[in-house]
Image: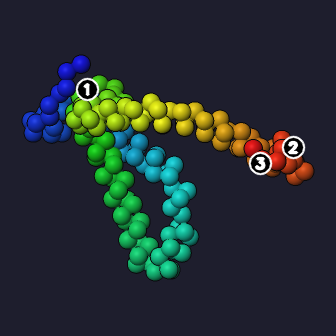
Amino acid sequence: MPIIRMNKKNRSLKDAPKSKKIGFFSGITIAIGSSIGAGIFFKAQAVLQNSHYSLAFAIFSWLFAAFSVTSMALALVEISSGRNDNLSIIGWCQTFNNHYVYKTCKNFMVYIYVPLTYFFMPFFFLLSIQDGIRGFNENYHGLNTKADW
């Protein structure tokens, strides 16, 4: 597969193909959805406590988060306009980086990310099922093992 060299002409949004897979609205939606998913770590009470109850710093933190979400969406639109394909992270690394970064990203995904994902997803599924059972039955204490899982 040939590597596409990016120049100023084919990197601008004005010259982007009309049939791209991710548009501005879907880019904003993906970025906001990922921020909402990560929003459990950015609660208002936690922001106020970590800013030592400084309202100005808390508002600055929320504005910085809003700027970050918008920047993520615009970056996603820019990346998707680079090629008119349905690329994954590895494909984007191959398109926009050198060979060393592409190989590093590919090895990371294959040898670290995928095995950890397929270990932790069933693990957290089992934990959430146990929490649900514990919600209905207060006397439930796991699978009668020394470990909580």
Which quadrant holds residue 116?
top right
Amino acid carrying label 3: it is Asp
Q: Residue at x 40, y 68 (%)?
A: 61
Amino acid carrying label 1: it is Asn
Q: Secondary structure at mark 1?
A: loop
Check the image and tell me how it is coloured.
rainbow
Q: Position of residue 111 (x, y in %)?
A: 46, 32
Q: Which mark is residue 144?
A: 2
> Is mark 3 in CB contact (under 8 Å) with mark 1?
no
Mark 2 or mark 1, which has the lower sequence index? 1
Hey, which residue is sitting farthest right in the picture? 139
Amino acid carrying label 2: it is Asn
Q: Residue at x 60, y 39 (%)?
A: 120
Most foreground residue, 82 or 118: 118
Q: Quadrant of the N terminus?
A: top left
Q: Secondary structure at mark 3?
A: loop
Q: Residue at x 87, y 47 (%)?
A: 140
Residue at mark 2 to residue at mark 3: CA–CA distance:
9 Å
Q: Quadrant of the C terminus?
A: top right
Q: Position of residue 12 (x, y in %)?
A: 15, 39
> Is mark 2 in CB contact (under 8 Å) with mark 3?
no
Q: Is residue 130 in view from this perspective?
A: yes
Q: Which mark is residue 84?
A: 1
Mark 3 or mark 1, which has the lower sequence index? 1
**Disc 3 marks which residue?**
148
62 relative position to 2: left or right:
right
Residue at mark 2 to residue at mark 1: CA–CA distance:
53 Å
Most foreground residue, 107 or 114: 107
